[in-house]
Amino acid sequence: MTLHQLLNEGTNSLLRAGAPEAQLDARRLLLEAFHLDTVHFLMNRMQALEQTKAAEAAIRHYRQMIKKRCSRIPLQHILGNQDFMGLTFKVNKHVLIPRQDTETLVELVLEEQKDRKKKVLDLCTGSGCIAVSLAVLGGYEDVTAVDLSLEALNVASENAGRLLDGERSIRFLAGDLFEPLNDEKFDIITANPPYIPTEVIKGLQPEVRDFEPVMALDGDKDGLGFYRRIAGEADKRLNPGGCIYLEIGHDQGEAVSSLLEEAGFKNVKIIKDAPGLDRVVRGEGGRHV
Ligand code: GLN
């Protein structure tokens, strides 16, 4: 038995189960089971595996993980993590798995907001990927993150604890959008709220539909429910010159821009993600002093 044979075996099982990215996922799980990096896998893949207890255990573990993936459990739930902005975030069924799309939002904030003293608020924080990346990579000293789900906040605070150096922390608050904040104001508000129209959810791929938290996806009938609520209140929550950054679905640019403009935001712009789709809307607010 060689690693190459195991890779083919796993890839074929995944293909039969209709899982996307079959070969990539099989390889990732093989590396995980054998604690290998890509270079060592490529160097050793044609050699017969030694018949040791450790190798047998690794093969068993690999086959178990392939079986889970065949039932369309997301790769990230099997591995327990997902990389985002070069950082490794713990994930589980209580949080949306960080998407590369969301890096567009983080990169935009890092580019536009260089002052580390600015107060940041991240709504619908989930795994904490936006809040933690901003604190780690942008060095913002005052970051608050809110989520309705206590289970999500547990994951987010674990990620913050692991990824931030000892002296710094993020304030995590449980509640519905701005509700746990009293009358506090911020300089930067970020959010990747649920934005999938309710009816669309049942047509999503099984990995998302059956395993990711519906409360992180469901944006109400037209997908815009959270943007309406956020736009309605955000301006009052911003200091003069404050900015809001919202992740959006690829077809929501016009609608979300209009919501922000109607709420009095200026310089509202739509920013595209790496594949060229509308992904972020940003606007400047903070008129209410
Ligand atoms: N981008 C996610 C998806 O396509 C949805 C994220 C969200 O609703 N905020 O599954």
Image (cartoon, helix red, strand yellow):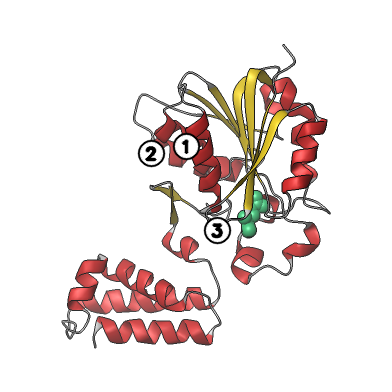
Residue type beneath disc 3: Pro
Residue 184 vertical placement versus 146 (above, below): above
Q: Is residue 128 visible?
A: no
Q: Which of the pair 44/215 is nearer the observer?
A: 44
Q: Residues within 10 Å of mark 2 (few under 14, many from 20)?
A: some
Q: Amino acid at mark 2?
A: Leu
The vertical placement of 109 against 215, above or below, is above
The residue located at (20%, 84%) in the rendering is 46
- The residue where tag 3 is placed is 275
Quick one: 289 or 60, which is closer to the camera? 289
In the picture of the structure, the residue carrying the numbered disc 2 is: 163
Tell me which numbered mark, 2 or 1, is placed earlier along the sequence: 1
Disc 1, SS: helix
Q: Quadrant of ligand 1?
A: bottom right
| Element on which disc 3 rests | loop
The percent coordinates of residue 284 (x first, y second) are 67, 26
Sequence order check, earlier mark of 2 and 3: 2
Percent across and percent down for residue 220 are 80, 51
- The reply to whether callout 2 and callout 1 are in contact (CB within 8 Å) is yes
User: How far is the residue under mark 3 from the one under mark 1?
Assistant: 24 Å
Residue designated by label 1:
132
